Amino acid sequence: MKIRIVAFGIAKDIIKGKELTMDLDNGNSISAVREQLSSIYPEFSKLSSLRFAVNADYVEDSYELKSGDELVLIPPVSGG
Amino acid sequence: MKIRIVAFGIAKDIIKGKELTMDLDNGNSISAVREQLSSIYPEFSKLSSLRFAVNADYVEDSYELKSGDELVLIPPVSGG
Amino acid sequence: MQDIYITVDKLNSKACTEAVTYPGAGGIVVFVGTVRDQTKGKAVKHLEFEAYEPMALKEMQKIADHATDKWSLHKMVIHHRTGLVEIQEEAVVIACSSAHRKEAFEACQYAIDTLKETVPIWKKEVFEDGEVWVSAHP
Amino acid sequence: MQDIYITVDKLNSKACTEAVTYPGAGGIVVFVGTVRDQTKGKAVKHLEFEAYEPMALKEMQKIADHATDKWSLHKMVIHHRTGLVEIQEEAVVIACSSAHRKEAFEACQYAIDTLKETVPIWKKEVFEDGEVWVSAHP
């Protein structure tokens, strides 16, 4: 499955862009995406945290992506 | 000794005025004044508390009044 | 603007907030006490505040000094109104600023709690059918 | 005025305070987060805030709803600014009102603490010689 990934904050700097489309090689779970991303962009492992959101809600690592889901990378937030 | 007493809040209602001058019969301590006041105005015993200030500072019951001290009655405060 | 202030005029919480703002502020906390329209279900027409002003200012200053010292504040401002205050109007404003927000929250709460215990200001609730000095009796 | 709001324009803490004022209010607590001029001793030129806006609004609304419910608030308003924010300008304003002040203090502190943990907004500190996404690295 192909998935569209949107980045904010430092995640944009890491993927050098606002968006990327990724072929999921090892399954459709968030943990699979996390692994794949970290192997392509080792910078992600250096962050304090990396969370994921689908359709504007946080999702757990066990979440299984469905076709059409918009996956958003949430590096450590720092509002306020 | 004669002492001038200034009242605020409900203490004004109790002594029916802003000020009174009292002859101290039983000594010059605040506790003596407290006793004398309560015997003249029993309403004071019904208050949640009654504190005293001399020259704009709280004083303890053991404080000995000096001639010229301005004694202020501080019924329960309720600012804010 | 004076930091510690008692006035019969309307208070200005915005001016108090601005007065504590500074370039190193990490957090500004402002408490505004407004006049409630009822007490224990009984409608209040308005409040009347009376202050023993020289002592009230002194006690307010003590609170601000202690809070500034204890919580390493940049600044604390305490303004209290006296006289007739209408429903919903500001009766007290306490603003403080600090490099860290937790300190500002604690200091502001300490200030209003202590003000209500030590500052010689009295509040009379005026009802349709009478009036009562607040907290006077147990 | 909207209760939950993200804007590139200047915030208005006074309007937020007024928005939560009501005749039954016993206490109004306002938190204002302003931009600090330095971080760990290093001079900051200004900040840049970026938000994942639909989700940020949703998370801010969750905070306001939870706080309103848990501390029986009358109302909570949360405004956050994005884009370039200058030193000393307001980056976030949280205002809430309640019949009892203790609840308003707790709710306001919960709201800013939680906002900093869950709301997808990112802050970049811009220095003379570079820029850093705040909290990105351990």
Image (cartoon, coloured by chain):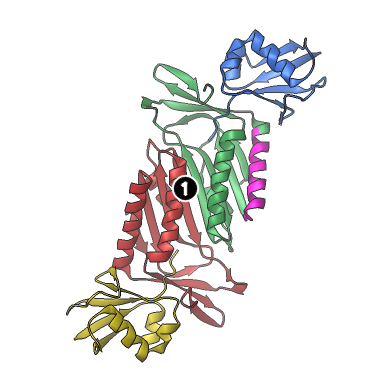
Chain colours: A blue, B yellow, C red, D green
Instruction: Please determine whether, in this image, residue C47 is positioned above or below residue C30.
Output: below
Q: Is residue D50 left or right of residue C6?
A: right
Instruction: Please determine whether, in this image, residue D131 is positioned above or below residue B64.
Output: above
* Image coords of residue C112 (percent x, y): 44, 58
Which residue is painted at 56% across and 73% down in the image?
Answer: C44
The local crowd at label 1, few if under 14, some if 14 to 19, many if 20 or more residues have their Cα within 10 Å, is many
The quadrant holding residue A22 is top right
Which residue is painted at 64% across and 34% down in the image?
Answer: D56
* Image coords of residue C31 (percent x, y): 47, 54
Q: Is residue C55 left or right of residue D10?
A: left
The quadrant holding residue A40 is top right
The answer to whether residue C12 shows anywhere in this view is no
Question: Please, what is the three-letter code of the amino acid marked with disc 1?
Answer: Phe
Q: Is residue A16 left or right of residue C97?
A: right
The answer to whether residue C110 shows anywhere in this view is yes
Residue D65 inside the magenta-drawn segment: yes
Which residue is painted at 21% across and 76% down in the image?
Answer: B69
Q: Main secondary structure of the magenta part?
A: helix
Mark count: 1
> Bounds of the magenta span?
D56-74
Disc 1 marks which residue?
Answer: C105
**Residue lying furthest left:** B67
